[in-house]
Amino acid sequence: MNKVALYVATALLSFGLSAPAQHSAQHKTQDLLIKLAPGFTEVEFQGAKVEKITDSWVRVLAPKNFSLHNFTKNPAVEFVQPNYKISLMDDYQIQDSLRRAALAKMIRRNPQPTALAAADNPAIPDAPQATTGADPLFPKQWGMLNIGIEEAWKVTKGNPDFIVAVIDTGVDYTHEDLLPNIWRNTKEIPNNGIDDDNNGYIDDVIGWDFAANDNKPYDLAMDPLDILFKGGNPGHGTHCAGNVAARGDNGKGISGVAPNVKIMPLRFITEKGQGTTADAIKAIKYAVDNGAKVLSNSWGSEGEDPAEGQENQALRDAVQYAKDHDVLFVAAAGNGHQGKGYSNDTDPKPSYPATYPHDNIVSVAAIDVRDNLGSFSNWGVKTVHIAAPGVAVYSTMVGNKYSDIVIDKFGFKATWDGTSMACPHVAGAAALYWSAHPEKTYADVKAALIGSAKKLPNLSDKTVSGGKLDVEALLKF
Ligand SMILES: [Ca+2]
Ligand SMILES: [Ca+2]
Ligand SMILES: [Ca+2]
């Protein structure tokens, strides 16, 4: 019959198949997102829990046996879909069974601490006094030199009022090289238990943690042994944030592409490397509503299979919301080795959200120090716009550290490789350009990124621009 019924059917089928076996409680509940029909601001279903997500979307937790009819007969319902899962694009879990057995033995012998509990998140420090001096680890940042950063910085290092939202696993906001550039919500009085700026979030002084629903979007990282065995977050958001806007010229660490702009840390992916569409949408809306002009998105979503008539309409609407507010949505193109849902050429096999049709999206591929496309990197001459450094990338790590290595333990070594690492370079570049040209629109910024890209023969049939990020040319564009 109508759209509603079709999507309810596919939604429930999909949800039943995709619910993780280890969370048996989820089998007893349907976790759905429902779009309200025009003119409706709320909806109720007897026996179901309804949570408002945006003006037009609600999350509904309904009993497993809740009938489709409850939705289809309700005039307030326009669209129903599962609350699709979202995950980090990089997974360091070891698959080989012999090595896993050896790791299991090690864990039994030496129980490892896992991530901090959310309740143990460090307090939010005050903004520090400014320090000056060269950034001692800058020479290790091959990616900065690769994109011509030093010439670009002669034009601008970014407007201190410009905000880039890092929508990810959180950020180590206590890190010496990030803390000076962490956004401050000056309309919120800290620790008074009141939502002073009336934005729906109490004491949100630097951002929000949508996974734990608190005001400390700290980057909870798993122990390396746990990551090798079970997967999880190695401090992904902190690494991304450093490449956007680690503080420059402060005598410490490194420098981001836009070393004077602000980072808004928004956490919606947990220490296990997983999030939900509902939380992603809330994070995107928060970023837009609280002044971020560029969103850095190094993650991939599920729930798009045109063959099955499925669509993550809720996430599409959130990207549209950003577009409607003149906000640029920079996204990692995706890593092809991930299996289902990802393929190297995103023209025939899209990767989401990077491949959504919204023209405020910039999809970013990864190159190495010799400008070769990373073996894992997605490309697409129609759907991936530009390449940027994304192999063995040096940046900030949780716990006041810096590295280009994710894990080097138990004979297993991984460097920070991924379109996840390339995306923040382009987000930082957009922030630089927009700082220099505040009158421009997202469409102008995107056109400048593409138009100024350095054309390379090996990328001519791989990206829309036929090249890689060139911030020197960008700032002269
Ligand atoms: Ca608030
Ligand atoms: Ca407050
Ligand atoms: Ca620094």
Image: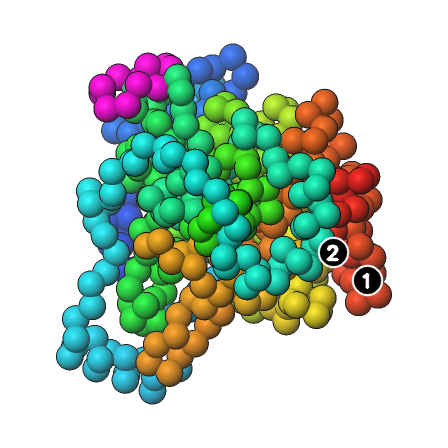
- Which residue does the image show at 53% across and 45% down from the upper left? 248
Asked whether residue 241 is in view, the answer is no
In the image, residue 273 lies at what x, y percent? 38, 55
Residue 323 x %, y %: 64, 29
Amino acid type for the residue under numbered disc 1 = Leu
Q: Amino acid at mark 2?
A: Lys
Residue 258 — which label?
none
Quarter, ligand 2: top left
Q: Residue 92 lies in what quarter of the image?
A: bottom left
Question: Residue 311: within the magenta?
Answer: no
Percent coordinates x, y for residue 158 in the rendering: 61, 35
Task: Please name whichever residue, 365 or 337, is drawn nearer the observer in this view of the structure.
Answer: 365
Residue 446 image offset from top left, x and y in percent: 73, 38
Q: Relative to residue 117, is residue 391 drawn left or right?
A: right
Residue matched to label 1: 456
Q: Residue at x 49, y 65 (%)?
A: 404
For label 2, being within 8 Å of ligand 3 is answered: no
Majority secondary structure of magenta residues: loop
Give the residue drawn at x 54%, y 30%: 160
Q: Residues within 10 Å of mark 1 (few under 14, many from 20)?
A: some
Residue 139 or residue 316, whichever sits in front:
139
Residue 191 among those drawn in magenta = yes
The outermost residue toward the bottom is 98
Q: Which residues are magenta?
A: 188-198
Q: In this orientation, does residue 140 appear?
A: yes
How many numbered marks appear? 2
What residue sits right under mark 2 in the picture? 468
Circles 1, 2 touching at the beta carbon (< 8 Å): yes
